[in-house]
Amino acid sequence: MKRYLCSLLLMATLLPLCAHSQSTEFTLIMDRIRADQLAAVQNVTTLDNGVTSTLATMQSNGSWPDVSYVYSATTYNGGTHLDRVKNFVLAYSHTGSSYYHSSSLFTAIVTALTYWDTADPQSWNWYHNQIYNPQRTGEILIILRIAPDTLPTTLYNNLLSQMNRGVPANQTGANKMDVAIHFIYRACLTENATLMATGVSEVFQPLSYTTDEGIQYDRSFQQHGPQLYVWLWFRTGPGRGEYGSIPARHVVRCFVGQGAGTFAVSP
C-alpha cells in the first residue's frame, strides 16, 4: 500500500467508465482492489515459500502456536493470523504461484478462517478490533470473491459481521479514514449503496481543514490530539510515521477504486 504515488491519482482521474448498474460498479471496484492486492506481490517465489512455511506450522484447528489470540495489552498479535491467511489467499489467487487454485490450500484457508470466526480474538487495543482486523478480513473476502471455490455461506456471513466494527463518524483524521476504508470494503461485498455513501463521505472528510485532528490551517497534520506530524506527511514507514501517509494513500486508493462511477467524488 505504501507504493501509491501522486501519478496514480492522475491516472485515476483519466479512467473512463461506461454507465454501469450499481451492482456492476461494486464488482468493478472490487476488481480494482483485487488487482491492486495481487500487484503488490513483489516476489511470487518468496510468497510461495512463506505459504509453505506457515502451512507446515498451522495446527489442525486452523490456529498457529506462535500467535497470541488472548486479550492483552502486551502480547496480542492476532492480526498475524489474518496476515498469514491473506498470504494464502494471494498465493491461491495469483496465476504465477505454485499454489494457484490449489484445493488443499483453499481447505487450509477455510480452516484458518473458521478458527478466526469461532475464536473472534479481541485485542486490548481498539485499533486491531476496529481497523486492522476488519480491513484484512475485507481484503481476504474481496480477493476470494471470484475464486472457483467458495467459502461456506455461514462462515462468509459471520466474517462480514465481524467487519462491522468501528464507526468512522466517531473518529478523526487518519483513524476516520482507516475505519471508512473497511466500510467501503463491506459495502462492495454486500452491494449496499447506503453503506458505500457513508464510507466515501467519511474517507474524504478529513481532507477539509480543521482545528481538530487532521489537516490544520497551516497545512500541517495532527493525530492523537495536538501532536504534529508535519514532516511525516508524505513519509512512509513503520510506527507513527504511518499517520503522514495514510490520508494521501487512502484518497488515491478511493479515486483509483471508484473511478468515474456513481460513487466517484465530485471535483
Image: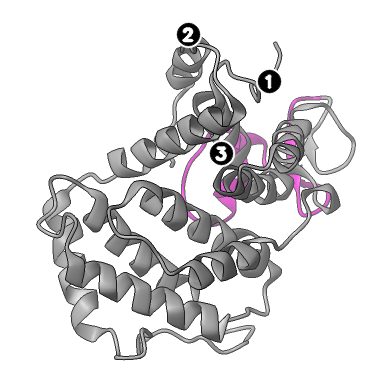
Element assignment for label 3: helix
Q: Amino acid at mark 1?
A: Val
Q: Which residues are magenta?
A: 218-245
Residue under label 3, please give it. 245
Q: Vertically, is 89 above or below 79?
A: above
Judge from the rendering whether residue 182 lies leftward or rightward of residue 153; answer left or right. Answer: right
Give the percent coordinates (x, y) of residue 232: 58, 39
For residue 265, which numbered disc appears in the image?
1
Position of the N terminus, as image quadrant, is: top left
Position of the C terminus, as image quadrant, is: top right
Q: Residue at x 50, y 19 (%)?
A: 9
Q: Vertically, is 19 above or below 161?
A: above
Element assignment for label 1: loop
Circle nearer the N terminus (2, 1): 2
Label 3 neighbour load within 10 Å: few <14, some 14-19, many 20+: many
Circle nearer the N terminus (2, 3): 2
Q: Amino acid at mark 2?
A: Leu
Circle nearer the N terminus (3, 1): 3
Is 225 inside the magenta-drawn segment?
yes
Give the percent coordinates (x, y) of residue 160: 59, 62
Task: Find the distance from the CA under tag 2 to the CA under tag 1.
Answer: 14 Å
Give the percent coordinates (x, y) of residue 152: 43, 69
Residue under label 2, please give it. 14
Is 130 inside the magenta-drawn segment?
no
